[in-house]
Image: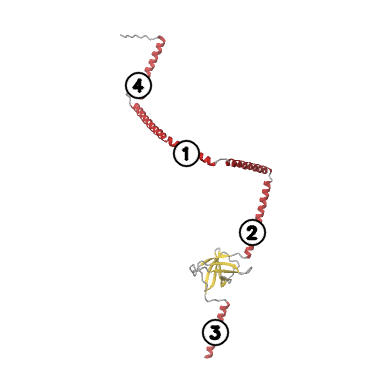
Amino acid sequence: MKHEIKVGLTVLISIIILSLSLLWVKDFQPNVKTLNVVFSNVSGLEIGSIVTVNGVKKGKVKTMEIMGSKVLTTLQLSDDVHLYENATAKLMMVELMTGKKIELYPGSEDYSPLAKNALIEGEFSADVPALVGFAGEALDSLRLLSKELHIALKSANGLIGDPVLQDDLKHTIKNMREASGDLVRVSRTMRGVDIKQLIAKIDSTLNTIHTTVNDIRPDLKATLSQTSSTLTNANDLITSLKTLSDDLKSNQSTLAGKFLNDSLFMVKLERTITNLDSVLKLGQDDGIKIKLNLF
């Protein structure tokens, strides 16, 4: 019985030692925490790459997966790492031309602790191969720029060598010199002018105008009053004429009313004038005998 117990204890101890060995080989840490970081690019980063906190190794990259146009990276950190809401992560080179690591800045205690399942935005720093690629792109752009500059200089050379343009440019420079000379002469002339005296004259003229306006203001008010009265009288006259015209049109008892409204009266008057004209013509030709008894 004791032998069986010894065998069982031996097997159990062996299993425990084997498990501990496996955990040691896998770098198992019993007290860990995870952090999710999103990068736009994780070039050179691998699962198992180290994670440092302020330069101290405190974890490793656990998983990486595509999340749309970005990469979601899960970090496994020691439980003694305390993160705050302003925590940041940066993808950096371990050494020149070697692998990548993630440098984690935990933040400051002025902020609240970071939530357990929080997601922070990581920053990608270009490494040497990326810088070489950027340099290549810059050289290509520089070549293109040099080519465009050569074309521009060639065009400018052809433009400057144009005789017509040269003559126009000489004429323009001559005009600029003449204009500059005119400005110098005007400046010299202005130096001889007494600005204070000129301002005093302008001030005196303005005072004279002000006095004149004050002097004619009463006459101007009287004139405006008379004009207003005249306009009122004219308005009354127009009203009276309109009333008279309406009476003449409507009242046929007067001579003027008959002239304007009675068509039969107008016919009779026309006939009378015609007969009178005939009598006058007859008198001019044969004479008219008039028998007049005064007493």
Q: Earlier in the sequence, mark 4 or mark 3?
A: 3
- Marks 2/4: CA–CA distance: 113 Å
Instruction: State the residue in front, 262 or 140.
Output: 140
In the rendered image, the vertical position of residue 224 relative to residue 74, given as above or below:
above
Quickly name the residue at label 2: 138
Q: Earlier in the sequence, mark 2 or mark 1?
A: 2
- Under mark 4, the amino acid is Phe
- Under mark 2, the amino acid is Ala
The crowd level at tag 2 (other Cα within 10 Å; few <14, some 14-19, many 20+) is few
On the image, the x and y values in percent for residue 294 come to 32, 9
The quadrant in which the C terminus is found is top left
On the image, the x and y values in percent for residue 188 come to 60, 41
Q: Which element carries disc 2, helix, strand or loop?
A: helix
Quickly name the residue at label 4: 265
Q: Which element carries disc 1, helix, strand or loop?
A: helix
Q: Residue at x 64, y 61 (%)?
A: 135
Quickly name the residue at label 3: 13
Mark 1 or 3, closer to the camera: 1
Q: Earlier in the sequence, mark 1 or mark 4?
A: 1
- Marks 2/1: CA–CA distance: 73 Å
- Marks 1/3: CA–CA distance: 120 Å
Which of the 4 image quadrants contains residue 145?
A: bottom right
CB contact under 8 Å: marks 2 and 1: no
